[in-house]
């Protein structure tokens, strides 16, 4: 094919579609390269599904309309972002497309400028950027592109220079983050970003695309990618361990030029800071020990905070419980709103995320009006959550994300609808069930949020699953296929070859003398014998504790436990 001197509209669309397809091909290799053996949210899957949303939006735009194409890339990125890796990728794509929108025929210098804008978008997404992540790879790619453009390089020269600089940056990430070096891997988000440059080179110069590693069913680290651990409410590259008690969230009316001062002010009183928005309206989130100060920072800058939400956090989710989402071979999760004309109006409706038909039915019995399929195996997009919020028969909505990787996506929904939307940051199904017990459909969203958050935070949760790779843990060595028990905040506390024995060890860690109620949620892989063993052990060891067994049907986790 002839070399292209300009990235015109057709070439831009082809590049984005090729990027999506290439990330799809490489997603398995990206997903399985992690030092933590739990199946949870994955970089490759989340990036691919974010790009699915981008391509869907782009396909709906006039293929000859350059502005509409760029707008579609930006909007699809925002609405389709899934998980931390998807959110950071969405910021990169929006910065990239926003610059390219200015010129329908992009040459080397403009391409370099677009990469610089993408870098700004990526770094602006987090308050405390950590080098050795996708942020570094994007920035050094942009620097390589600028150097080539300043020397008069053509489009191909600039893209090739960006790719070379990015590859060097990716190879150096283990020297910047010890967790990568210890695992013998590099950052998966950065590896995923480089596929964008590979895709552009393929379109403009016929460069062969990198060959994806075969999915041979093994779980060991292969290739060169690793997703640095992220804070449950932050973006990729933010590695702080929070010791703050309160979670404060609100919308803020504040002039764009003052948002930097606002972030710095919050940086002095808290952490896990996420500030997203523009054009005078911002969605703000912080963990802090001083609720008043979190609000006063905005007032001191003549800002107007509204829909203020405060949660008293029970404890931080263990940061080393990294995203490990299992591939299910489907293109995306499906929204299943259970509301609409068929359900009566309520003051506040609940939208919940879950997998498993048993849990769906149980949630419906507890008054949930909208269910979005997702969780450990599928991270729903902002657009899917928003669509369900719009369908429920209420003007106020509580969202239960029920997975730490879905919380940052859920927190974007409120800014995209006229409905009042609050998020109770549940990270598991037992927390959600406890929250739903105190849900009052006739109370307002803020009152429900406070009551439901308190109920969710009072639950000690445990999860039983099988290891997908070898690992070393405080509970001992883990081998592929071992059963592992996890406790919120403590990570892996039980390892064994027997599902029943491991479940009992896990229960021994979470059932204390003050326990009053234990909820057992059975999923795929649970069996009558193991369930009977669990019930017998609880009857013998904790005879005064009530036990409820619910059939959830959730994938990958045959048993979930909640202790109240």
Image (tube, grey):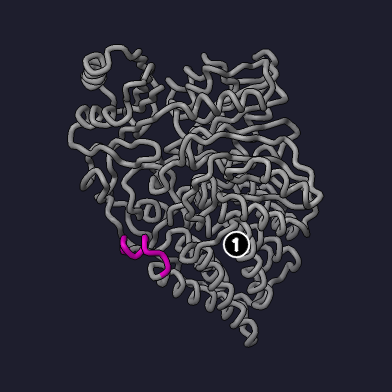
Locate residue 233: give its quadrant.
top right
Q: Position of residue 432 (x, y in %)?
A: 49, 26
Q: Position of residue 379 (x, y in %)?
A: 50, 40
User: Which residue corresponds to the image point at 65% horizontal and 35% vertical from the top-left?
Assistant: 309
Q: Taken as a whole, is the magenta stretch helix, strand or loop?
A: helix
Relative to 356, 258 lies left or right: right
Residue 22 drawn above or below residue 354: below
| SS label for mark 1 | helix
Q: Position of residue 321 (x, y in %)?
A: 39, 45
Instruction: Say which quadrant the N terminus sits in.
Output: bottom right
Relative to 377, 93 lies left or right: right
Q: Residue furthest bottom?
A: 151
Q: Which residue is mark 1?
A: 123
**Residue 479 visible, this orientation:** no
Instruction: Say which quadrant the C terminus sits in.
Output: top left
**Residue 549 visible, this orientation:** yes
Magenta segment boundaries in residue numbering: 176-184
């Amino acid at each position: 094919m002839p070399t292209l001197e300009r990235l015109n509209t057709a070439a831009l669309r082809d590049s984005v579609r090729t990027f999506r397809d290439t990330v799809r091909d490489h997603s398995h290799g990206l997903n399985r390269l992690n030092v933590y053996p739990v199946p949870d949210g994955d970089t490759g899957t989340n990036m691919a599904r974010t790009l699915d949303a981008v391509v869907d939006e782009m396909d709906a735009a006039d293929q000859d309309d350059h502005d509409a194409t760029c707008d579609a890339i930006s909007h699809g990125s925002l609405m389709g972002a899934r998980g931390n890796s998807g959110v950071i990728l969405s910021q990169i794509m929006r910065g990239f497309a926003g610059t390219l929108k200015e010129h329908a025929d992009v040459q080397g210098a403009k391409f370099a400028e677009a990469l610089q804008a993408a870098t700004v978008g990526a770094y602006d997404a987090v308050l405390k950027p950590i080098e050795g992540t996708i942020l570094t790879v994007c920035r050094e790619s942009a620097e390589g592109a600028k150097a080539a453009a300043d020397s008069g390089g053509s489009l191909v020269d600039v893209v090739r220079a960006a790719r070379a600089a990015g590859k060097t940056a990716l190879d150096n990430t283990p020297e910047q983050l010890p967790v990568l070096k210890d695992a013998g891997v590099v950052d998966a988000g950065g590896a995923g970003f480089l596929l964008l440059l590979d895709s552009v080179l393929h379109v403009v110069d016929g460069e062969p695309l990198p060959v994806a590693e075969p999915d041979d069913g093994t779980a060991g680290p292969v290739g060169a990618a690793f997703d640095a651990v992220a804070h449950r409410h932050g973006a990729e590259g933010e590695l702080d361990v929070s010791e703050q008690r309160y979670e404060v969230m609100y919308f803020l009316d504040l002039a764009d030029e003052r948002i930097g001062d606002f972030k710095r002010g919050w940086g002095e009183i808290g952490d896990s800071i996420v500030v997203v928005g523009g054009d005078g309206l911002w969605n703000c989130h912080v963990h802090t020990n001083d609720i008043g100060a979190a609000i006063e920072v905005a007032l001191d800058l003549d800002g107007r905070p509204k829909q203020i939400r405060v949660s008293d956090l029970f404890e931080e989710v263990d940061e080393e419980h990294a995203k490990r989402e299992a591939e299910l071979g489907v293109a995306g999760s499906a929204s299943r709103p259970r509301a609409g004309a068929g359900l009566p109006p309520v003051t506040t409706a609940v939208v919940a995320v879950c997998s498993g038909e048993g849990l769906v039915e149980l949630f419906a019995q507890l008054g949930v009006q909208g269910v979005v399929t997702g969780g450990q195996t599928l991270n729903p997009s902002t657009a899917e959550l928003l669509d369900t919020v719009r369908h429920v028969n209420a003007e106020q909505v509580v969202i239960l994300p029920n997975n730490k990787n879905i919380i940052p996506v859920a927190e974007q929904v409120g800014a995209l609808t006229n409905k009042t939307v609050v998020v109770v940051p549940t990270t598991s199904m037992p927390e959600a069930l406890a929250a739903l017990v105190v849900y009052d459909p006739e109370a307002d969203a803020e009152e429900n949020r406070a009551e439901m958050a308190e109920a969710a935070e009072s639950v000690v949760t445990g999860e039983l699953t099988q290891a997908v790779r070898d690992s070393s843990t405080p509970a001992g060595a883990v081998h592929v296929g071992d059963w592992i028990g996890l406790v919120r905040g403590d990570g892996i506390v039980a390892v064994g070859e027997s599902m029943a024995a491991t479940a009992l060890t896990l229960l021994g860690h979470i059932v204390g003398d003050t326990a009053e109620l234990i909820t057992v949620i059975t999923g795929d892989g649970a069996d009558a014998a193991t369930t009977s063993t669990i019930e017998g052990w609880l009857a013998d060891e904790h005879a005064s504790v009530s036990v409820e067994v619910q059939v959830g049907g959730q994938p990958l986790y045959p048993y979930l436990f909640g202790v109240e």
